Image (cartoon, rainbow, N blue to C red):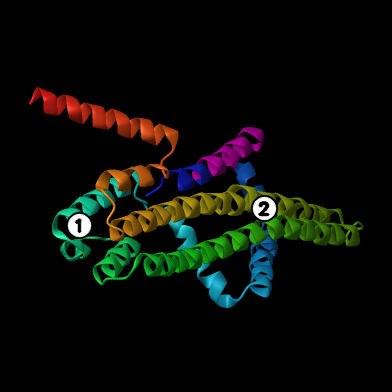
Amino acid sequence: MDIATPAGMLIGALLLIVSIILGGGVSGIVGFINIPSIMIVIGGTISATLVRYPLQVVTGLVTLSMKTIFVKLSSPQFEMERLIEYAKLARREGLLALESKVVDIKDAFLSKSIQLLVDGTDADGLRSILEKEIDNVRGRHTKGKGVLESMGIVAPAFGMMGTLIGLVLMLRELDDPSKIGVGMATALLTTLYGVIVANLILLPMSGKLDIRSKEELLLKELVVEGVVAIQSGDNPSIVEEKLKGFLSPSQRKQKKMEALKDQIRSAGA
């Protein structure tokens, strides 16, 4: 679970609440709650999204967005080490020996890759099948990111619409001073709600989803390269060199340090 996303939202909300309390006391919070304003911003944003995107895409957005919080991805170093072990096993006992590993693999993409390898799929076939699946994942993530971005754009727009509605209500009741405050509150609060929803929730979630998508796609591309190398019968050291290209400089340095520590332990033993 990535606690950064909910923590960031919570901290942002708490800072807003504390600012309101410092400015107008605890009772001031009540003045910032306006149901019509909430309906305009939230209802308008959802309605505009339904107009723009198919229902299936919108309903699937919740599941996709949860990936930014609850899905924990493996690291490139771990996947590389696992594929190197598979390469050693395949070189020592043959590709069929990898069949025993399929049951223990929790990652569906890697499991499918190894199963295709065991079934005798050639290198070109492996790459074609797996890259097509990567393209489908990329398309789903891009679409989900686009929906969140679209919602982040229209939320402030509906805030401005609420402002116009509030101003119209206020101007119509200029002869009744007791109703001017209601119109002004709706006018100002809808803009505030739109800005908060867009900049504290929707747009940051879109950015986080984009980061998660790139991380997941990198891991899948690493798996494809490793599995194709194993199918081609490459030496495990060659497989390792091919997969090092997927590591960042800091990750490569970390791996080099771990290898050096292992050598020291082996020499000491």
For marks 1 and 2 on the same chain, the one whose residue lies earlier in the sequence: 1
Give percent across and percent down for residue 88: 20, 50
- Check if residue 210 falls in the magenta segment: no
* Image location (x, y in percent) of residue 138: 51, 62
Quadrant housing the C terminus: top left
Looking at the rendering, the stretch of residues picked out in magenta corresponds to 10-26
- In the image, 198 versus 64, the foreground residue is 64
> In the image shown, does 34 or 257 lie closer to the viewer?
257
Residue 188 percent coordinates (x, y): 76, 50
Who's the residue at 32% across and 58% down the image?
Answer: 227
Q: Secondary structure at mark 1?
A: helix
Give the Cα distance between marks 1 and 2: 58 Å
Please give left or right for residue 72 compared with residue 184 in the image.
Answer: left
Mark 1 highlights which residue? 90
Q: Residue at x 74, y 52 (%)?
A: 191
Residue type (three-letter) at the residue carrying disc 1: Ala
